[in-house]
Image (tube, rainbow, N blue to C red):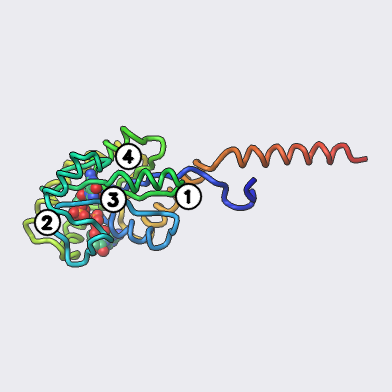
Amino acid sequence: MNDVASVPARRGLLLIVSSPSGAGKTTLTRLLLAEDKAMHLSLSVTTRPRRGSEIDGVHYRFVDAGTFETMREHGELLESAKVHGNYYGTPRAPVEEALAAGRDVLFDIDWQGTMQIYDKMRPDIVSVFILPPSVSELKARLERRAEDSPEVIMRRLQNSRVEISHWTKYDYVLVNQDLQTTYGRLKEILDVERMKRQDKSVVACLVEKLKADLDALMRKP
Ligand SMILES: Nc1nc2c(ncn2[C@@H]2O[C@H](COP(=O)(O)OP(=O)(O)O)[C@@H](O)[C@H]2O)c(=O)[nH]1
Ligand SMILES: Nc1ncnc2c1ncn2[C@@H]1O[C@H](COP(=O)(O)OP(=O)(O)O)[C@@H](O)[C@H]1O
């Protein structure tokens, strides 16, 4: 039996974080990955051009359209979607390996991908939707990030309208006003959801032992 004073064993969970572009999901998920060594990023493949701050194999695997299509045809993607005119997909094998090993996996994917993974793995999923506090702040964040052209920023803002309408499909919604507050809430969600998935057999063993010890105590003269 595990030491009951330590965190009991549990199944791995799949944490999905989605948001309209610029709301802050990359910032939040990078903070989490840096701090939480039990969390592993699902590295997506994409046909989108790499941004200056991104590293191939760390933030995305950047592939051409032909490679993406071959992966999709061969069933190598757990889900895939076209977002802002580019293709994105989640490689299947690393997720299945992580789940089998009881590790937690983090997905930064859009609502279309979320729906596809829900269909396959709903009990293991915890989904969080991040909203910006206002449109002006969303636009300002996209501009401050300074990674996209004005045309790309306008397209992302335009697409935000559809994306935010999917918030109802998520388990939790966070409004990312103050970054540290939002990050704190995200960690609270994760703590609770991990606790919910604790291996109950460990608790059952402890309860049996407590009962036996109580019986023994009561029998003492
Ligand atoms: N379905 C799906 N969406 C993805 C995947 N990877 C990233 N996305 C989504 O694609 C959208 C665009 O991502 P990105 O190009 O990094 O831009 P950003 O949202 O402005 O940071 C975001 O909504 C991401 O969550 C994936 O593997 N599958
Ligand atoms: N709570 C916040 N307050 C102010 N700026 C933020 C906040 N969260 C994120 N940002 C900034 O907004 C920009 C967009 O954030 P990012 O994480 O790239 O968004 P997304 O991944 O959702 O497109 C980045 O420059 C980031 O530093």
Can you tell which mark lies on residue 108?
3
For mark 4, give the secondary structure. loop
The quarter of the rendered structure image containing the C terminus is: top right
Q: Is mark 2 within 8 Å of ligand 1?
A: no
At label 2, which amino acid type do we have?
Answer: Ile
Q: Earlier in the sequence, mark 3 or mark 4?
A: 3
Neighbor class of circle 1 (other Cα within 10 Å; few <14, some 14-19, many 20+) is: few
Q: Earlier in the sequence, mark 2 or mark 4?
A: 2
Residue 209 x %, y %: 72, 40
Can you tell which mark lies on residue 191?
1
The residue indicated by pointer 2 is 153
Spatial distance from mark 2 to mark 3, Cα to Cα? 19 Å
Spatial distance from mark 2 to mark 4, Cα to Cα? 25 Å
Q: Quadrant of residue 51?
A: bottom left
At label 1, which amino acid type do we have?
Answer: Asp
**Left or right relative to 180: residue 211:** right
Spatial distance from mark 3 to mark 1, Cα to Cα? 19 Å
